[in-house]
Image (cartoon, grey):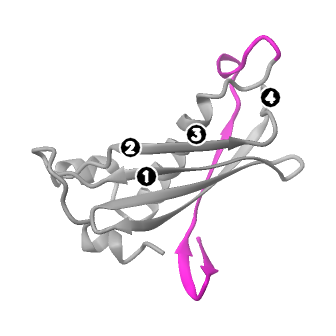
Amino acid sequence: MSDVVAGHTARVATSRVRVRYAETDQMSVAYYSNYLVWFEIGRTDWLRDTGWTYREMEADGLSLPVTEAHCEYRLGARYDDELEIRTTARRVSPVRMAFDYEIERCRDRALIATGRTVHATLDRAGKPVRIPARVKELLT
């Protein structure tokens, strides 16, 4: 899926999750750290939608460790809520990329969280390398 953003076509991956009981606290509200897990689901699906999985990327000698993470919590997700995660990616520098996330509750389309993660592109030795051309072409 893609949207037009400032004259560019942004690739948007859409993922769905349902809040599990184990992800909630005593009040049946999703515990805050789960949002980062849901972000990971979104970026894994974004990469998979490009035709290149994390497994294939690592087999090719590249990794994308998180160097920064941010989440703005707007509304609490509750047990059994179905959530939609929308993920886009952008280039930050020749060796870094960022993923932007929106999490929406499906039943009422309420935006419950937004966030971003920034990732370095590293080779097998852990040294920064340029974002691969096949990924760079997809970034906004």
> In front of the other: label 2 or label 4?
2
Element under disc 3: helix
Q: Are marks 3 and 1 in contact (CB under 8 Å)?
A: no
| Above-or-below relation of 37 to 60 | above
Q: Is residue 25 magenta?
A: yes
Label placed on residue 78: 4
Disc 3 versus disc 1: distance between alpha carbons? 15 Å
Q: Looking at the image, is mark 2 or mark 3 earlier in the sequence?
A: 3
Question: Residue at left 68%, top 44%?
Answer: 72
Q: Three-letter amino acid code at disc 1?
A: Val
Image location (x, y in percent) of residue 121? 27, 55
- Name the residue that disc number 1 marks: 118
Classify residue 113 by image quadrant: top right
- Name the residue that disc number 3 marks: 38
Disc 2 versus disc 3: distance between alpha carbons? 14 Å
Disc 1 versus disc 4: distance between alpha carbons? 27 Å
Question: Residue at left 26%, top 74%?
Answer: 133
Q: Residues within 10 Å of mark 3 (few under 14, many from 20)?
A: many
Q: Three-letter amino acid code at disc 3?
A: Trp
Q: Looking at the image, is mark 4 or mark 3 earlier in the sequence?
A: 3
Q: Looking at the image, is mark 1 or mark 4 earlier in the sequence?
A: 4
- Name the residue that disc number 2 marks: 66
